Amino acid sequence: MTDTEKLRGIIKTSGYKIRYIAKYAGLSYQALLNKMNNVSDFRICEIIKLCNLLHINSADRDEIFFADNVAEISNK
């Protein structure tokens, strides 16, 4: 599950528009919004593109895109 608020904060400070980010990641505007709002999941290649464009470091990447998955694995 994506940490929508943290991702939106990074996007806001980046200065990029959502439509540009979507196009860069190879997504439609609506597809990006759906992924950001946890309607659908980001693919790894999309995460890599977003991290490159938005200069998201590995710690923030894990918090934004993988925090719930790591918590689930740790609890098993």
Image: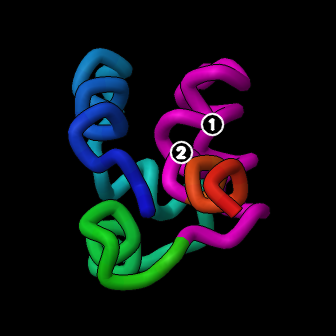
Residue sticking out furthest to the front:
76
Closer to the N terminus: mark 2 or mark 1?
A: 1
Name the mark on residue 37: none
**Residue shown at 35% from the left, 38% from the top:** 7
Is the residue under label 1 in contact with that under label 2 (CB below 8 Å)? yes
**Residue shown at 61% from the left, 34% from the top:** 61
Tell whether 41 sits left or right of 43.
left
User: Is-magenta flag for residue 51?
Assistant: yes
Q: Is residue 39 above or below residue 50?
A: below
> Residue 34, how many percent across, how many down?
30, 77
> Residue 49, how many percent across, how many down?
69, 48
> Residue 20, how many percent across, how many down?
40, 50
Q: How is the image coloured?
A: rainbow
> Residue 45, how many percent across, how many down?
77, 62
Corner quadrant of residue 62: top right
The amino acid at mark 2 is Ala
Corner quadrant of residue 26: bottom right
Tell whether 48 sits left or right of 22.
right
If the image is split into quadrants, where does the C terminus sit?
Answer: bottom right
**Residue shown at 65% from the left, 21% from the top:** 59
Q: Is residue 45 above or below residue 51?
A: below
Q: Is residue 76 above or below residue 28?
A: above
Corner quadrant of residue 17: top left
* Image: magenta residue range: 42-68
Q: Read off the residue under disc 1.
A: 62
Name the mark on residue 67: 2
Crowding around mark 2 (Cα neighbors within 10 Å: few <14, some 14 to 19, many 20+) is: some
For the residue labelled by badge 1, is the local secondary structure a helix, a strand or a loop? helix
The amino acid at mark 1 is Asp
Q: Is residue 29 above or below residue 20?
A: below
Q: CA distance from mark 2 to mark 1?
A: 6 Å
